[in-house]
Image (cartoon, rainbow, N blue to C red):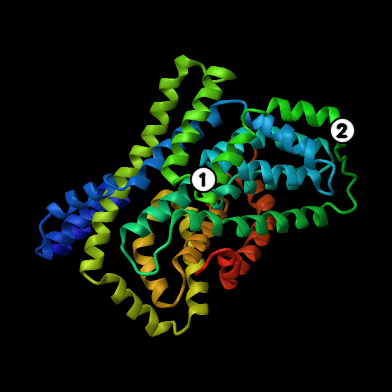
Amino acid sequence: MAAIVSVLITFLALFGAPLFVIILSAAMLGFYFSDIPLTVIVVEIYRLVDTPLLLALPLFTFAGYLLAESNLSSRLVRLTQVFLGWLPGGLAVVAFITCAFFTAFTGASGVTIVAVGALLYPALVEAGYKDKFSLGLVTTSGSLGLLLAPSLPLILYGVIVQQMNLPNSFTIQELFIAGILPALLMIVLLTAYSIWSNRGQTIVRGTFTRHDAIEAVLAAKWEIPLPLVILGGIYSGFFAISEAAAVTAFYVLIVEVFILKEVKFTALSKVVREAMVMVGGILLILGVSLAFTNFLIDAEIPQQLFELISFYIKDKITFLIVLNVVLLALGAILDIFSALVIMIPLIVPVAMRFGIDPVHLGIIFLANMQIGYFTPPIGMNLFIASFRFKRSITELYQATIPFMFVLLFALAIITYVPAVSLVFLDR
């Protein structure tokens, strides 16, 4: 009977059934044949609802959708171009930092490519950067901010792991701090590659003038305090994550709707609906996934998986190599939220048995997902960029591969030098 139902669930997955249906079906099947009451699923969903930290997800998502709907992208490009455009590789640095900031706050790399990439791509070409280089840069930069607060995947990883009640727990603030140096490492290495790749090219650099700087600061005067106050409050401990999310949502709503009036009041219901549809999908998948996680723990699946893996893999280094390969493949075929809720319950207990810190593991996981967004053949950002810039997928493959190798080098450092993630933490 169990085999027949398992085959049926597999067929549902192959024919495109919603992910939450597949996970819920698997959880119900496991509980049914383990003689565990199915009410456990309801209890797990209620436990999720009762998690104070979860409030941050809809609030940060709402703020991100509002920012994406506004003209923040153009003001952000102008601000970074004035202050950084005069540096060697200046416009490339502008692109990396702007995309990282925009993705961190909006939580959507595809939106970054469409909104920010559309501004940066012609500017890069006009400044003298090669067309293929510019195309690869804006495609790969779209996911750079996933390691920076208040990135939704960072928060979601923290929520999932904390619900597992594992030893060596951590706070979301620690996770936010852990992502700073790895993100900076990626930006620095990409900048170095950009300068080296365009050697011999005549690149037009921007010039810093006091007049332009004042104008750019005044244009972005309402957004500039946002990262300073919110992230400063989080890192200093003045704000809890949920409080920071509430302040962010309220501040962005007042600024974009009532002060700048870039998001019309009549369009607010549409923004709320789109944001909450996304949040609802995440929470539905997360709720049933936690129920499935409960089954996995009761059935000792992680322990059995560890025993199976340790039969072939004897040390942490080899495990991390295999883990990176698997995560890169998953990042290319799954969206980041699905990958998190499916894989984290399996990976975290096994990784901790190999002596890997869960905070370090979270940074490794998200760094892989970030690269997976543009990993051939089916990375999501490749198709978004292909549609946005009217280029063939094969052109995108050729344009992004050099950047992928640079980020793989950064990933290797992040993976095998835990201090890059943990140096500021007492772990």
x, y percent for residue 75: 68, 29
> In percent of the image, x 41 and y 73: which residue is there?
352
The disc label shown at residue 186, or none: none
Quick check: 380 above or below 262? below
Q: Amino acid at mark 1?
A: Pro
> In percent of the image, x 39 and y 51: which residue is there?
338
Q: Is residue 67 left or right of residue 402?
A: left
Q: Earlier in the sequence, mark 2 or mark 1?
A: 1
Q: Is residue 183 left or right of residue 23?
A: right
Q: Residues within 10 Å of mark 1 (few under 14, many from 20)?
A: many
x, y percent for residue 61: 45, 37
Q: Which residue is mark 2?
A: 209
x, y percent for residue 106: 53, 38
> In percent of the image, x 18 and y 51: which residue is there?
43
Q: Which residue is mark 1?
A: 150
Q: CA distance from mark 2 to mark 1?
A: 32 Å
* Residue 214 shows up from this direction: yes
In this rendered view, identify the residue nearer to me: 414 or 47: 47
Quick check: 266 above or below 287? above
Q: Quadrant of residue 7?
A: bottom left
Q: Amino acid at mark 2?
A: Thr
> In percent of the image, x 68 and y 60: which residue is there?
406
Secondary structure of the residue carrying tag 2 is loop
| Position of the N terminus by quadrant | bottom left
Q: Is residue 369 left or right of residue 89?
A: left
How many numbered marks does the figure carry? 2
x, y percent for residue 97: 68, 45
Quick check: 407 above or below 379? below
Q: Residues within 10 Å of mark 2 (few under 14, many from 20)?
A: few
